[in-house]
Structure formats: structure tokens, C-alpha cells
């Protein structure tokens, strides 16, 4: 599954994009903005390749994912800004990669709970 080149995913009462039950899409080149929950939410067993998106000003985390069976999520080269909570929130996940993102003006940059992501080349300010 691909979620690609959507000009505006915003103003939803919950998450802009919510993935569950072993979903594994590529989320590429979208604008995800001002949702009342997360910009992108992956619940346990879901994974995604999230690349080149503009994700900003969501009320909860701009991106949130995790769960004991959550593995193999890639977050690459996104602009993640202005979240009321975390830029990226990760809890109890397996292997994941967060590379080359601009993460700025969020309440917290990246928050990890019982998670060990590979962080490389991000700009967090």
C-alpha cells in the first residue's frame, strides 16, 4: 500500500493517518497537519516506511508508534515541526530507523520508552 503525494491530510478529530493490524505502507511526500491527535499513528503490529513528508502542528505526537510486535519502521528525510507534544514518540518497539529528519519546534524532539531506535543524521532543535 502507498499513501503518496496527498497535498493535505489535516483537521481530523483524531489521527491524520492511523495504521493497525499488520498494515505496512509507504507514506511518501504528503502534508499532514493540525490533526487533533497524531499526524501518523502506528499501533502494535503495524509498520511503515515514512519518507519526505511535511508533518506539523498536530496536537499529540506528530508521529507515534510502538508495541511489542512493532518492528521495521523507517522514518527518513521528513520535516517534523511544531507539535504540541513530541516530534516522534516511540514505545516498546523493535528495530526501527530514524535518519536525516528535521525535527524542530516541538514540545519534545524524540521520546523513547523501552525502545532502542537507530538515530542518525537528524537535526533536532
Image: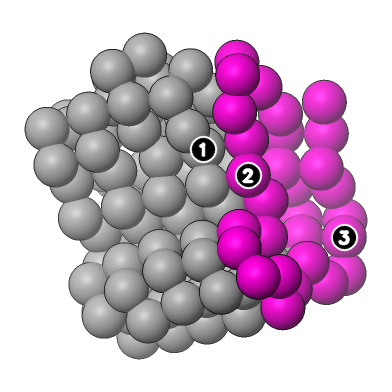
Residue closer to the observer: 6 or 14: 14
Image quadrant assignment for residue 52: bottom right
- Residue 2 place in picture, x, y as percent: 83, 34
- Count of marks, rendered view: 3
Res. 84 image quadrant: bottom left
Q: Badges 1 and 2: C-beta atoms under 8 Å apart?
A: yes
Boundaries of the magenta span: 1-30
Picture coordinates of residue 18, whole percent (x, y): 63, 44
Name the outermost residue toward the front.
Answer: 13
- Which residue is the site of mark 2? 18
Question: Which one is in front, 119 or 61?
Answer: 61
Reading the image, the residue beneath label 1 is 42
SS assignment at label 3: loop
Residue in the picture at 87% in, 60% down: 6
Mark 2 → mark 3, Cα distance in angstroms: 15 Å
> Residue beneath label 3, please?
6
Q: Quadrant of residue 106?
A: bottom left
19 vs 79: above or below: above
At 71% across and 70% down in the image, what residue appears? Answer: 12
Mark 2 or mark 3, which has the lower sequence index? 3
Q: Main secondary structure of the magenta part?
A: loop
Circle 2 or circle 3, nearest the eye: 2
11 falls in the magenta region: yes
Q: State how far apart marks 1 and 2 are (Cα).
A: 6 Å
Amino acid at each position: 500500500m502507498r499513501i503518496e503525494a496527498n497535498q493535505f491530510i489535516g483537521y481530523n478529530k483524531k489521527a491524520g493517518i492511523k495504521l493497525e493490524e499488520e498494515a505496512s505502507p509507504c507514506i511518501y511526500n504528503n502534508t499532514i497537519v493540525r490533526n487533533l491527535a497524531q499526524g501518523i499513528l502506528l499501533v502494535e503490529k503495524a509498520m511503515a516506511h515514512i519518507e519526505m513528508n511535511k508533518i506539523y502542528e498536530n496536537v499529540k505526537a506528530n508521529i507515534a508508534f510502538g508495541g511489542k510486535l512493532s518492528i521495521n519502521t523507517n522514518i527518513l528525510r521528513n520535516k517534523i515541526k511544531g507539535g504540541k507534544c513530541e516530534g516522534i514518540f516511540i514505545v516498546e518497539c523493535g528495530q526501527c530507523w530514524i535518519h536525516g529528519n528535521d525535527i524542530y519546534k516541538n514540545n519534545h524532539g524524540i521520546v523513547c520508552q523501552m525502545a532502542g531506535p537507530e538515530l542518525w543524521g537528524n537535526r533536532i532543535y
